[in-house]
Amino acid sequence: MAGFSLQHPWAFTFGLLGNVISFMTFLAPIPTFYRIYKSKSTEGFQSVPYVVALFSAMLWIFYALIKSNEVLLITINVAGFVIESIYVILYFVYADKKARWFTAKIMLGLNVGFFGAILLFTLLVFHGDKRIVTLGWICVAFSVGVFVAPLSIIKRVIQTRSVEYMPFSLSLTLTLSAVVWFLYGLLIKDKYVALPNILGFTFGVVQMVLYVFYMNKTPVVADGKEAGKLPTAADEHVLVNIAKLSPALPERSSGVHPVREMGLPTRTCAAEVAAATRAAPNRDVVDVLVSRQSPAVGVA
């Protein structure tokens, strides 16, 4: 319990700070779920980020319990477990049948099947320190996979020369979180907590540098197939899918209502927008759905 002991004030300070930052990150999807509640529909949002975040919280709680009750790891991940469970339940309530069934399959496969296999494997096969080492490396492997996720948005920022879907405040928060949890792991001499956050810090800094570099650049307009997807009088919105993978973060959307997409290659964007506006002046012409994966918040 070194991280919780006042005999290690710096470890306690960084652990407490990590709890605060990570708790705020867990609460970030609240606007998304408020919109889902108001519209009584998941509006095309995906459940995967919340299911994965729930699995991450379960995994780190198990690790912290096995390793002599690391209280500060337990507190934040118990909070994460409760919050992510609420998100998943709300998703089940308002999702359509297809999305609900897809979410159920992921939950059974990841949170029940895979987690159960890890639990049985580590408890039955290993004992003492070997159990902690094995579980620690499993946590590291999962966390590294989570932190690699931002490569997708980094690639898109470079391709489009636009930082619209990579807010600076978000990258800064993730970087600070990685620094705090790295220092906490270092101070309590837990490499399994510290190691993944080196990668998290690296990707956070890269995102901030890219933001500064591209913030005033002129975005590149999509060509080809995507450029031909424009609204008609019969379609209220055009849905543009932009995959955005980032540790610890929820999906974001800008007034999304999934509808059909139609390609009209013979007309220009300006002409189509004007036509759609004349046909339906009170409708939104283009909405963008940002699908962001946000696993493994607030642990390591």
Image (cartoon, rainbow, N blue to C red):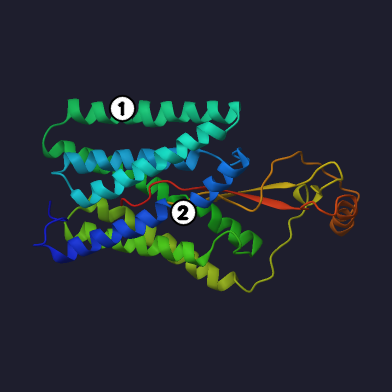
Q: Which mark is residue 28?
A: 2
User: Residue sitting at 86 percent across and 55 percent down?
Assistant: 277
Q: Which mark is residue 116?
A: 1
Task: Identify the image quadrant of residue 268.
Answer: bottom right
Does residue 218 lie above or below 65 as drawn? below
Q: Is residue 252 left or right of residue 54?
A: right
Neighbour class for label 2 at 10 Å: few (<14), some, many (≥20)? some
Q: Secondary structure at mark 2?
A: loop
Mark 1 residue type:
Gly
Disc on the earlier residue, 2 or 1: 2
Residue placed most toward the observer, 136 or 103: 103
User: x%, y% of residue 106?
Assistant: 46, 30
Does residue 264 lie above or below 219 as drawn? above
Q: Which mark is residue 48?
A: none
User: Residue sitting at 77 percent across and 41 percent down?
Assistant: 261
Q: Is residue 269 left or right of residue 139?
A: right
Residue placed most toward the observer, 60 or 213: 60
Does residue 120 lie above or below 62 as drawn? above
Residue placed most toward the observer, 203 or 290: 290
Does residue 150 lie above or below 63 as drawn? below
User: Residue sitting at 47 percent across and 43 percent down?
Assistant: 49
Mark 2 residue type:
Ala
User: x%, y% of residue 258?
Assistant: 69, 41
| Alpha-carbon span between mark 2 and mark 1 | 29 Å
Q: Secondary structure at mark 1?
A: helix
Residue placed most toward the observer, 166 or 144: 166
Neighbour class for label 1 at 10 Å: few (<14), some, many (≥20)? few
Q: Can I make out residue 73 in this image?
A: yes
Q: Residue furthest left?
A: 7
